[in-house]
Image: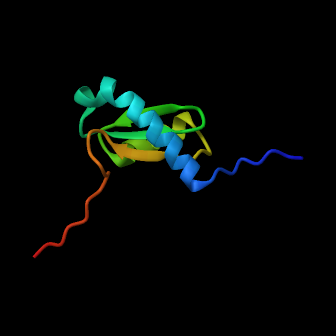
Amino acid sequence: MKKSNYIEKEEFIGKAEAIYKKLMPRLGKKYKGDVMAIEPESKKYVIAKDELEAALKAKKHFPRKVFYFVRIGYPVVHKFRKYG
């Protein structure tokens, strides 16, 4: 039987969040506000100043992988607001 590269969404998120929580005490103060792209299968990550830079770095280091993005020290990467 051929091994599938498919991972369930909940498992993907769970692995990525566990990696982030483990790294947070060490990286939180230094990189607060930066964006981290996590590749859960390898447990590796890249950090950049914004989402685009993080995505480009992650794609270069981990071609054809899916990433989990988090803004270090914040609950969400983006916040949508109504203006006006």
Q: Quadrant of the C terminus?
A: bottom left
Residue ID at (20%, 67%): 81
Q: Which coloring applies here? A: rainbow
Q: Farthest residue in the right direction?
A: 1
The foreground one among 74 and 55 is 74
Residue ID at (36%, 47%): 51
Percent coordinates x, y for residue 22 in the rendering = 41, 29
Percent coordinates x, y for residue 82 in the rendering = 18, 72
Residue ID at (24%, 40%): 33
Is 51 left, or right, of 41 in this rendering? left
Count of residue discs: 0
Relative height, residue 52 to residue 73 (above, below): below
Q: In which quarter of the image is residue 9?
A: bottom right
Q: Farthest residue in the top direction?
A: 26
Residue ID at (60%, 41%): 63
Percent coordinates x, y for residue 67 in the rendering = 51, 46
Q: Farthest residue in the left direction?
A: 84
Relative height, residue 7 to residue 17 (above, below): below
Q: Quadrant of residue 46?
A: top left
